[in-house]
């Protein structure tokens, strides 16, 4: 005979497990999964177009938990994603172009007064920032809470505030627009700075959500 | 009382569960080690084979865009330069790249020089031995000097090292007198190397060698 106080706990556990499995559509190593193969093909087709031109592009490989800087199909640099979360179960198989790189405060050299102006260094780059793309996509870059609790909290607060406004706008509108997809990437402090340093206006970005192997 | 408490808890758990179901999110944490078993019907096997073949063909097609010979990779964040052939590193060097500072152009209210090393893919356009520096306007302005009208006054020898590799718009990979600043972002956009590394890059690179800068 199950004690009455156990039942809600079991129910809670069941609901969490059910909810979690229902919202996690990304098989990682599903070699027998046609959907994953189709997505991989779609990403490769897009990458072929990018690699055909002399340019640098970014591949966000979510199952491999890696940000990969690429050019001509070759990997130039990679750094790990500590955790990620995406707001939609829809495929993100298109090329997203960065509207603007994160703002940087550039030291201004006064003519003849200070020619040895301090340069911008990697440590001057932000550790928590937002990247907005066309077609609409928002990527929130946050540091791990243990490395930078204040930045983590403020970034999450900003993220939730934006989502709240979006939901409110959807509720109030008679013709609600499709919710803008968003992706949150947790990167180490150094890697977040590296990413902020490396991105440029108009940078093409591809996102891989599932792996065929 | 106990019944009321139980009803409340059940309602609360249901509400939380429904809230999670309503959020269409997937996460890297939840799926990291969860391969999903799927049944494959015989009719789907052909489709799977075709999809696998298509994917392999695309991977091979992508590889055709890889540089066939040596190529140069510059990491401006860490001030590193590599010469690679396929995955092999032929040379790893410490460099100096753009400082990211700005300088106002005199007489132009909104115009500025931005001393960044350009990012993207370029190619070696010129290979020079014993290059001379043709000083641009900003070099004079930084020193508090007037910009000379005579082009001959802009020429300065012996400051760029023994070699220089041009990659467009006045940007070069060249040597430096200030070797203690290698590894730092101090340049006006060019890429500086030590004498030995510069010589090695000069020997490995040809006109047309790709330079990938990020």
Image: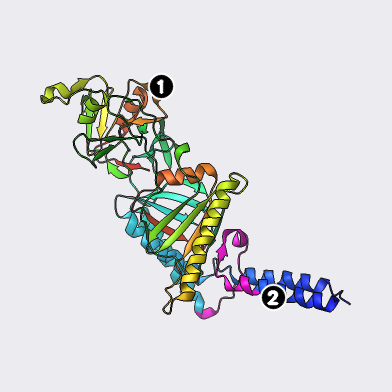
Q: Is residue A107 visible?
A: yes
**In this image, B102 relative to A158: left or right?**
left
Task: Report if residue B22 lies within the magenta region.
Answer: yes
Callout 1 secondary element: helix
Q: Which quarter of the rendering shows the C terminus of chain B?
A: top left
Image point (48%, 72%), residue name? B48
Q: Quick one: label 2, few (<14), some, or many (20+) residues within 10 Å?
A: some
* Residue displayed at 40% across by 24% down: B181
The residue stretch that appears in magenta: B18-43
Q: Return the chain for callout 1.
A: B
Disc 2 element: helix
- Find out whether the residues at labels 2 and 1 contact each other: C-beta distance under 8 Å: no
Q: Is residue A3 magenta?
A: no
Query: Can you give x and y, in whole percent of width and height, for residue A88 in the image?
Result: 50, 68
In the image, A52 versus B19, the foreground residue is: B19
Look at discs 2 and 1 and give the one toward the viewer.
2
Dividing the picture into quarters, in which one does residue A202 lie?
Answer: bottom left
- Name the spot of residue B52 as percent of width and height, x first: 46, 67
Q: Give the residue drawn at x 64%, y 75%.
A: B18
Query: In terms of depth relative to the viewer, which is nearer, B93 or B151?
Result: B151
Q: Which residue is mark 2?
A: B14
Which residue in the structure is indicated by mark 1? B180
Farthest left residue in view: B150
Q: Say which of A163 and A122 sits in front.
A: A163
Kindly identify which chain the residue marked by label 2 belongs to. B
User: How packed is label 1: few (under 14 Cα within 10 Å), some, or many (20 or more)?
Assistant: few
**At which x and y percent is residue A65?**
54, 54
The CA distance from mark 2 to mark 1 is 65 Å
Quarter in which the N terminus of chain B is drawn: bottom right
A177 or A213, nearer to the observer: A177
Horizontal placement of B92 versus A145: left or right?
left
Colour setting? rainbow
């Amino acid at each position: 005979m199950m004690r009455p106080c156990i039942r809600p706990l079991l129910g809670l556990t069941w609901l969490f497990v059910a909810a979690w499995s229902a919202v996690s559509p990304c098989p990682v190593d599903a070699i027998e999964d046609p959907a994953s193969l189709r997505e991989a093909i779609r990403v490769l087709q897009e990458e072929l177009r990018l690699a055909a031109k002399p340019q640098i592009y970014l591949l966000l490989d979510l199952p491999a938990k890696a940000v990969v800087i690429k050019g001509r199909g070759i990997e130039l640099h990679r750094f790990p994603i500590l955790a990620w979360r995406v707001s939609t179960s829809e495929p993100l198989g298109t090329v997203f172009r960065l509207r603007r790189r994160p703002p940087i405060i550039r030291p201004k050299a006064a003519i003849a007064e200070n020619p040895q102006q301090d340069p911008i260094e990697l440590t001057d780059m932000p550790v928590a920032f937002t990247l907005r793309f066309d077609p609409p996509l928002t990527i929130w870059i946050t540091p791990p809470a243990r490395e930078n609790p204040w930045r983590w909290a403020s970034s999450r607060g900003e993220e939730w505030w934006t989502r709240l406004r979006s939901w409110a706008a959807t509720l109030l509108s008679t013709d609600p627009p499709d919710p803008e997809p968003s992706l949150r990437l947790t990167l180490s402090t150094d890697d977040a700075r590296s990413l902020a340093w490396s991105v440029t206006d108009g940078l093409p970005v591809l996102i891989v959500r599932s792996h065929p192997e | 009382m106990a019944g009321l408490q139980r009803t409340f808890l059940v309602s609360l758990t249901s509400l939380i569960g429904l809230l999670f179901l309503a959020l269409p999110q997937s996460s890297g944490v939840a799926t990291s080690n969860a391969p999903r078993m799927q049944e494959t019907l015989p009719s789907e096997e052909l489709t799977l084979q075709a999809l696998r073949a298509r994917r392999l063909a695309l991977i091979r097609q992508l590889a055709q865009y890889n540089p066939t010979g040596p190529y140069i990779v510059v990491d401006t964040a860490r001030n590193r330069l590599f010469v690679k052939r396929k995955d092999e590193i032929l040379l790893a060097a410490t460099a100096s790249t753009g400082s990211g500072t700005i300088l106002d152009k005199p007489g132009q209210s909104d115009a500025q020089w931005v001393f960044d090393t350009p990012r993207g893919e370029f190619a070696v356009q010129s290979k020079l031995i014993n290059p001379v520096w043709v000083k641009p306007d900003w070099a004079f302005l930084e020193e508090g000097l007037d910009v000379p009208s005579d082009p001959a006054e802009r020429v300065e020898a012996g400051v760029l090292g023994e070699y220089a590799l041009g990659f467009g718009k006045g940007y070069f990979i060249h040597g430096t007198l200030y070797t203690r600043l290698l590894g730092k972002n101090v340049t006006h956009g060019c890429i500086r190397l030590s004498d030995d590394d510069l010589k090695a890059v000069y020997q490995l690179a040809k006109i047309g060698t790709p330079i990938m800068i990020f």
